[in-house]
Amino acid sequence: MKVAKTIRHKILNHSSIFDETIRVYNEALTFIIEVIDNEVADTNAYSTKEMTNLIEGFIHTTKSNPNPKYAVFNQSFYKFPSYFRRAAIATAFGKVKSYRSLRKNWETEKQVALENGRKFNKQPPTKQFTHKEFPVLYKGNMFKRASDTTAFVKTFVKNDWVWVDVVFRPQDLYKRGVHGWKECNPKLVKQGKKYFLNISYEGKVALHKEKIQHQRICAVDLGLTNSAVCSILDANGTVLARKFIRHQREKDQLRRATNYLRKAQRLTGYASMPRYWNRINGLQKQILNDTAAQIISFAKKHHVHTIVFEFLDKMRIPKGYYGAKKLRFKLHYWAKKGIQNKVEEMAHYEGMRISRVNPRNTSKYSFDGSGEVKRSPRGDVAIFANGKQYHADLSASYNIGARYFIREIQKSISEKEWSDMMAKVPAFPTRTKQTLASFITLRTVLRFS
């Protein structure tokens, strides 16, 4: 499969020379968005290349097109580079297309609500012409690399487009895992007061094609107390390794930061509070990235073929649940999908696959098949029906891995073979009650059948 990775190179000179370039690019983007909005009724009828040719006919003066409808564009943006103009048209096309799609979905949702006699208070999407976008520097026209750490970039300086030499920080392509990959056009990005060249690298990675009986998986149970609990299982149901990822310090800091934010908002009313939000977002990002990195490192160490998660969608809190307000607050800052997406991206670089299983009752039933469990007051210990005590999240991770193997075995054989197997295991549980003990029972039947 094709994969891409973006590496950031900090520009070490010309700290503010690109401000005017960004300003002119965004003014041109606003102009082109207005043109597309006025002239194109159906954006879905055009591809990006067709839209580029169409809009250039409206705004760009050439020998074969001496009097375009919006000739003021060339007057307002004199000597505007051609690839800059095409990049702006492609971005503007995406902005208009996105707005119209959101508007259409809003109108459909409103119509359905009114037809069913429900109130509809959702505000429509807002059409925005002014944006703060960063341009792509196309090679040859806007960007010319001179060496591994220097390049020439076409920049708007003193009302003219000139080539400026830039020096940027090098990156170890071997260490970043992109050596030999195709280097794409860089993007000029500003963060704070500093500028960076974000260069994407494209490559091909072969994902594993191991049969189910030869696979080794990493089953991951994401949680609120523990960021993740991982276990390595093989196709026989043997647990080979375990790992707990906790982040107590970061989560305590996050709890304190959110409490400070709530207190400040109670005292002052609604306010943006950027300092608090920067702290909260930074802690969330740290937990997300470190959790993903530790999961991948653990999986690589044990030569895993597939990483298995629960399919976590919207979390519903039961009515009358004690502590519902506190739990809802915790769920709000739980980056469960962010962790899964980050792990999926990193796993594909290593040739690993990602799979998700039904999350229902993975923690409710014990992995040894003894039935439903009771939780300790803190909720971290599961007390089995036979009296055994075990870590609740670790038991859940075993069940997650077992459900993956059971599903893959069922997919790999015919319906008749599956029915014959189930006849030999009359008490085999339904999907939402399957545990590690269920998988081991199934393996026993397969071994002797």
Image (cartoon, grey):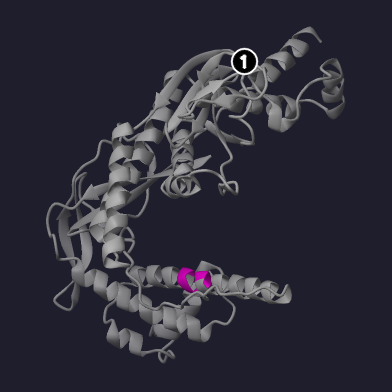
Q: Position of residue 377 (x, y in %)?
A: 48, 28
**Residue beneath disc 1:** 237
Q: Quadrant of residue 418?
A: top right
Q: Is residue 148 above or below residue 31?
A: above
Residue at x 28%, y 86% (from the top left corner): 76
Q: Residues within 10 Å of mark 1 (few under 14, many from 20)?
A: many
Q: Main secondary structure of the magenta part?
A: helix
Residue 109 visible, this angle? yes
Magenta residues, start to end: 94-98
Residue at x 71%, y 75% (from the top left corner): 117
Magenta-drawn stretch contains 116: no
Q: Position of residue 394 (x, y in %)?
A: 51, 23
Q: Nearer the viewer, residue 442 or 167?
A: 442
Q: Is residue 261 above or below residue 29?
A: above
Q: Quadrant of residue 202?
A: top left
Please state which amino acid type lies under the numbered disc 1: Gly
| Label 1: element kind | loop
Q: Is residue 237 above or below residue 317?
A: above
Residue at x 37%, y 51% (from the top left corner): 184
Q: Nearer the viewer, residue 157 or 371?
A: 371
Q: Quadrant of the C terminus?
A: top right
Q: Position of residue 316 (x, y in %)?
A: 58, 48
Q: Position of residue 438 (x, y in %)?
A: 70, 19
